[in-house]
């Protein structure tokens, strides 16, 4: 379908002005951590094939960094997020989510083996505009609750992700040719603008011709259509573990009353974290 080029270009310009995948390790002997909260206990296991995230999480647990922090962002049927150091002494109406430990962790995408199924433990991060490498927060994490999807919805997600790859390449070319496009706009030369669009689209398709088409694996499809999850986050945030016990506690937390900033009205506190094995 042909896009109205002038509108598209203006939208792109307006926005402008305003991993290496590793082979999964054996799952045997993965380390478990108990997260004690005032709602109950959650036990997570940390993947061996995301070693930087695993080592960092264990270091913070040993240092007591998480003790007294809150689950400061809770969205029902999506996820519960914690790990902001500022939440330890936060006032009731305080906005949270910007706290950190002064460093980030390189993304460790072990995809599609590690994905955002229900119970996945993943690292929060800043958005792509300020964090194009998708590096993880040094301390903030979230646990996925998500929702169950049907097959047709997953197919549409695949199409959207593949379109986004093309759109990203096309947008970069638009920015490179911004001056010429703006001159054609000033002249009101719609014919030349459409010709430019076709040219840039052809160049974008050529650029991404070797990029594999995105498609969910059978394991992902089975998980997302049975237990659920958040498939739109796959390949965007590092998944470094999963809940092995206490999902009932996670579910209880995700259903608490929250304010307009998604912070629970009554604090959900991480009292202690304990490494159960190594």
Image (cartoon, rainbow, N blue to C red):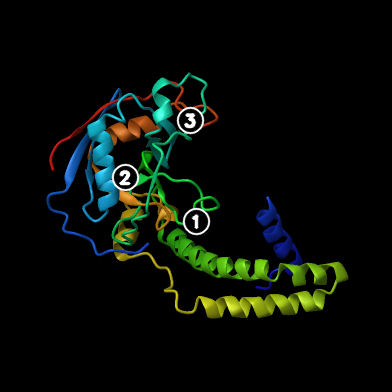
The secondary element bearing badge 3 is classed as loop
Cα distance between the residues tagged 2 and 1 = 22 Å
User: Tag 2 or tag 3, which sits nearer the N-term?
Assistant: 3
Q: Earlier in the sequence, mark 2 or mark 1?
A: 2
Residue 15 or residue 264, whichever sits in front: 15
Q: Residue at x 37, y 25 (%)?
A: 268
Q: Residue 91 in the image: state x and y as whole percent.
A: 48, 19
> Residue 139 occupies which quadrant of the picture?
top left
User: Closer to the camera: disc 1 or disc 3?
Assistant: 1
Q: Is residue 195 above or below residue 179?
A: below
Q: CA distance from mark 1 to mark 3?
A: 23 Å
The residue labelled by disc 2 is: 121
What is the number of the mark on residue 132? 1
Which quadrant, please, contains the C terminus?
Answer: top left
What is the number of the mark on residue 276? none
Residue 126 located left or right of residue 53:
right
Mark earlier in primary sequence (1, 3):
3
The residue depicted at 46 percent of the width and 59 percent of the height is 153
**Residue pictured at 45% horizontal, 56% vertical:** 133
Q: Is residue 202 visible?
A: yes
Q: Quadrant of the N terminus?
A: bottom right
Residue under label 3: 96
- The residue at the far right in this view is 187
């Amino acid at each position: 379908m042909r896009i109205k080029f002038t509108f598209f270009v203006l939208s792109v310009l307006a926005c402008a002005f305003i991993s290496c995948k590793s082979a999964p390790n054996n799952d045997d002997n993965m380390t478990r951590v108990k997260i004690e909260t005032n709602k109950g206990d959650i036990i997570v296991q940390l993947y061996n094939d995301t070693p930087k995230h695993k080592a960092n999480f264990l270091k913070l647990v040993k240092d007591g960094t998480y003790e007294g922090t809150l689950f400061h962002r809770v969205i029902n049927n999506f996820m519960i997020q914690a790990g902001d150091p500022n939440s330890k002494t936060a006032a009731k109406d305080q906005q949270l989510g910007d706290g950190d430990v002064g460093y980030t962790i390189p993304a460790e995408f072990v995809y599609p083996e590690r994905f955002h199924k229900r119970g996945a433990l993943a690292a929060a991060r800043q958005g792509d505009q300020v964090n194009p490498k998708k590096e993880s927060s040094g301390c903030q994490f979230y646990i996925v609750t998500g929702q169950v999807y049907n097959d047709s919805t997953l197919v549409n997600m695949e199409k959207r992700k593949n379109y986004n790859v093309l759109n990203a390449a096309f947008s970069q070319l638009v920015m490179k040719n911004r001056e010429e496009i703006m001159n054609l706009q000033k002249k009101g030369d719609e014919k030349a603008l459409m010709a430019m669009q076709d040219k840039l689209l052809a160049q974008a398709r050529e650029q991404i011709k070797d990029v594999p088409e995105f498609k969910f694996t059978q394991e992902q499809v089975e998980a997302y259509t049975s237990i659920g999850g958040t498939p739109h986050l796959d390949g965007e945030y590092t998944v470094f573990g999963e809940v092995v016990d206490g999902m009932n506690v996670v579910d209880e937390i995700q259903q608490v009353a929250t304010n307009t900033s998604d912070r629970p009205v009554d604090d959900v506190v991480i009292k202690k974290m304990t490494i159960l094995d190594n």
